[in-house]
Amino acid sequence: METLTDLEKGIEILMPFLMQHHFVLNTHDNLGNADSYFTQVKFINKNKEFKIGYLTSVGYLIYKYEDLKVSHDFYLDKLGFAGKRKFKAIQTENKLLVFKNILHDFEFLVEDFFAGNCTKLREYSKHPENIIKLYDKRAEMAREMNNRQSDEIRIEQARKKFINKDFKESLELFRSLENKNLISMLDEKIIDYCTRYLDT
């Protein structure tokens, strides 16, 4: 998918800098379906974490030290680089320019985050204007939407398995659902039939 290709090329732009500061790719989670992907990419260095949230472009950047977090814009603004930062989380045609802007902004964070002890990050994370919860909520909403879509697909597969008399697989698919509220009265009858059939 083109969106993910853009993201992978963007990560290649950031990797030399991140590796220089001993950050390694920890997870690359694609949360989506054939039409839309929300992706979270995490880089870890011991108790530090750098996270990218990506849909059609970079939506947010998070810096984390242990359990304390700040967003890219808030962090740089508090450090006094509001007028110098280039990453603005604005959708643009040039997907790779966004990553070049992020790389440019990394230089402002070397002393505190990448090479330092996150003294300022820890201080700013407790600031009442730190809007990190908004980013966490967006990520959680995307995850929930993906889980629901996956469960809807599983239900369709379970029904087909039942029609094809594969009762064991049908029942396993129904049991694997995270959103049990998607189960209809028809599905409940299928589950009951499969359970009774397999118990005999």
Image (tube, helix red, strand yellow):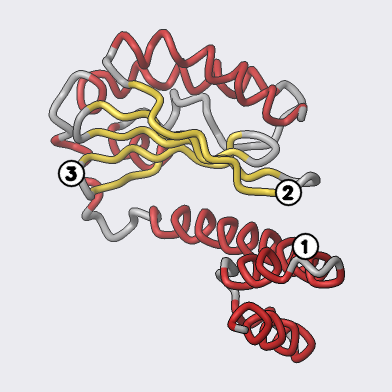
If you read the primary sequence from the N terminus, does the residue marked by circle 2 or circle 3 appear first?
2
Q: Amino acid at mark 1?
A: Gln
Is residue 44 shown left or right of residue 194?
left
- Judged left or right of residue 71, residue 142 is right
Q: Nearer the viewer, residue 198 or 125?
A: 198
* Disc 2 secondary structure class: loop
- Circle 1 SS class: helix
Q: Are marks 3 and 1 in contact (CB under 8 Å)?
A: no
Image quadrant for the C terminus?
bottom right
Residue in the picture at 39% in, 53% down: 132
Q: Residues within 10 Å of mark 1 (few under 14, many from 20)?
A: some
Along the horizontal axis of the image, is 54 left or right of 129? Answer: right
Give how far apart the Cα atoms at labels 3 and 1 are: 47 Å
Q: Quarter of the image holding residue 50?
A: top left
| 103 vs 51, nearest the viewer | 51
Q: Earlier in the sequence, mark 3 or mark 1?
A: 3
- For label 1, the residue is 157
Residue type at the position of mark 2? Asn
**Amino acid type assigned to the residue bearing label 3 in the image:** Arg
Residue drawn at the location 44% of the way across and 28% of the way down: 83
Q: Which residue is mark 3?
A: 122
Badge 2 density bin: few <14, some 14–19, many ≥20, Cα 10 Å: few
Pair 2/1: label in front: 1
x then y, percent, for residue 8: 60, 21
Q: Which mark is residue 175?
A: none
Residue 123 in the image: above or below residue 147? above
Task: List the residue tagged with mark 2.
Answer: 33
The residue that appears at 86% across and 71% down in the rendered structure is 163
